[in-house]
Image (tube, rainbow, N blue to C red):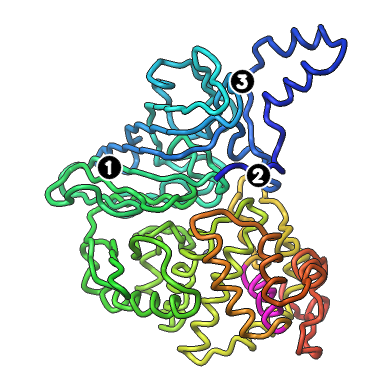
Amino acid sequence: MPHSLRFAIPRARRAKAVLLAPAVSVCLIAASAPSPAVPLGIGDRLFPTLGNPGYDVGSYDLSFTYPGSNSRPLNAVTTILARATERLERVNLDFAHGTVESVDVNGAPAAFARTGEDLVITPDAPLPKGSTLRITVRHTSDPAPMKDKDGGWVRTADGLAMANQADAAHLVFPCNDHPSDKAMFTIHVTTPEGYTAVANGLPVGSEQGATTWSYRTVHPMATELAQVSIGRSAVLHRQGPNGLPIRDVVPAKDREALQPWLKKTSDHVAWMENKVGPYPFETYGVLIAQAQTGYELETQTLSLFERDLFTAAYPKWYVESIMVHELSHQWFGDSVTPRTWSDLWLNEGHATWYEALYAEETAHRPMEERMKAAYGLSDDWRATGGPPAAPKGPKPGQKISIFRPNVYDGAALVLYALRQEIGRPAFERLERAWVGVHRDGTATTAGFERLASDFAGRDLSKFFRAWLYGEKTPPMPGHPDWKSAAGRPGAAG
Ligand SMILES: [Zn+2]
C-alpha cells in the first residue's frame, strides 16, 4: 500500500530542502507562504496527475442514495481513513464529476477548492506526519457521461453499474485514484423500493427487505476495481469449489435465460484453482448488465459483463473463454495489482494467457496457433502501442486507449516465450508463486522478472529486456521459423 519511492518527491520534502539550503532567506519566506491549490499526482508515467502524494488510504466508506433515475445525480457521503506519510498542509483527493457540499477533516470543517481533477482540502492546522486522517466529503455523484472521459458510472437499461478502469473512480467518488494505494471498502446504497443494490464484497447485515444495502470487502481493493450495481436485478446464489459463495447479479427478467451461463462459473473457478492455486477472495460472481460498454471488466469479486455477450450468437467456447479471462483477473490484476499503469501487461497478458489456455484445453483451440498468429502481428502492435511493458500513453480524451493489443495477445506472447525459454514445469511453478507471494498487494514488472529468474535458476534480465521493452519482437525460442508479418502486403494494420 505505501507509495513507491520512485514517485515524485512530495511537496513538504521539497520545502524542507529549501530550508536546509544556505543563504535562502527570500526562498524561506516564499516556502512558508501559502502555495496555490494545484492538482497533484504520484508521477505515473501514463497518468501523471492520478493519485496523490503524502498519505496512504486505509479504508473508504461510501454511501450513495439512488434517486430512482439514472440520469440524475446521486447524493453521496465518502469517508476516508488515511495515514499521513508526511506533514500535510493540504490534502489532495482525485474527484472530477459531482458537486462538493462540505468537507470535514477529523471532525472539523475544512476549506476546499476544485482544481483540475483534484479536490484540494485545507484543514485548520497542518496534519503531522504519521497522524490519522478521517476525511468526510458530502457530495453528489453524477451518472451522466463526462465530456472527453471514459468510465465511471455506466447507465444500464434499469439502473447503474460501474466501470472505473483505468482512471475513472474519481468520476464517482473522491479518492486516491491509483492502484498503488489499495484500501478496504464499505459501500452502502439506499434505493427506492423495487431496486436491488450489490457491491464488492459480502453483505453486512441482512439483505432481506432492505432499502439500504451494505457490503464490505474482506481484502484490500484498488479504486479502479470498485463495483456498485443498482437495478431491477435478481441475485442468484450458488456454491463453488471448497464452499466459495458464488453470487451472480442479472436483470430479473433474464434470470432463467442466463442460467446455463451462470452455472459454468463454478467449473471455471475449479479450473483456475488447478492452474494457479486458491481463489483469492471471499466471493465471486458475474454482473450482467444491459448496457453498451464495449468491454467486460474484472471488478473485484463481481466482474461486469455486457448482456449482449450472452444473448448474441457468439460461439460457446468464445463466451466461456471471456468469462475465464475476467475470472483470472481476480488473481492477476485484482489480488495482485499493478504498481503503475505501465505494469498493465501483467494484468492483461495473464488474463489473455488463461483465456487462451482454457480454449486450448476445453475447446481444441491450440495455444501455439494463437501465439504464432500473435507473433506475426507483434511488431505492428509494438509500433502502434509501444512494447508491452513500456506502452504508449493514452490518446487525449480516450484514456482506455492504453488497452491495446500490445498488452493483450502481445503480452501473452511474452508469457509464451517465457514458457518456451524456461520450460513448462518452471513456468507453472512461477505462476503459482507470483499470485501467492503478492496476494492482496501491488507488484511490478521488475518483481516478475526477479521471481522468474529465481524459478529458472538463472538471470533472465536480458530475455525480459528484449521481450518487454524491445521495439522489435525477438526470435521465439523453439520456433526459429516464426516471422513477423509486418511490412508484408496485406499485413494487418
Ligand atoms: Zn482483461
Which mark identifies residue 454?
none
Q: How far apart are marks 2 and 1 (CA)?
A: 34 Å
Q: Which amino acid does label 2 sit on?
A: Ser
Q: Can residue 9 be seen from the camera position used here?
A: yes
List x then y, in percent, for residue 482: 77, 87
List x then y, in percent, for residue 250: 28, 63
Q: Circles 1 and 3: CB distance less than 8 Å? A: no
Q: Name the residue under label 2.
A: 4
Q: Is residue 371 above or below residue 60?
A: below
Element type where label 2 sits in the image: loop
Element type where label 1 sits in the image: strand
Q: In this view, does 74 lie above or below 385?
A: above
Position of residue 410 in the picture relative to residue 187 (left or right): right
Position of residue 168 in the picture relative to residue 465 (left or right): left
Viewer-proximal residue among 132 and 8: 132
Say which quarter of the image contains residue 50.
Answer: top right
Q: In which quarter of the image is the C terminus?
A: bottom right
Q: Quadrant of the N terminus?
A: top right
Sequence-wise, which precedes: disc 1 or disc 3? 3
Say which quarter of the image contains residue 480.
Answer: bottom right
Q: How far apart are marks 1 and 3 (CA)?
A: 32 Å
Q: Circles 2 and 1: CB distance less than 8 Å? A: no
Which mark identifies residue 189?
1
- The magenta stretch is 408-420
Residue at 28% of width from left, 79% of height from top?
A: 260
Q: Which amino acid does label 1 sit on?
A: Val
List x then y, in percent, for residue 92: 56, 28
Viewer-proximal residue among 65 and 199: 199
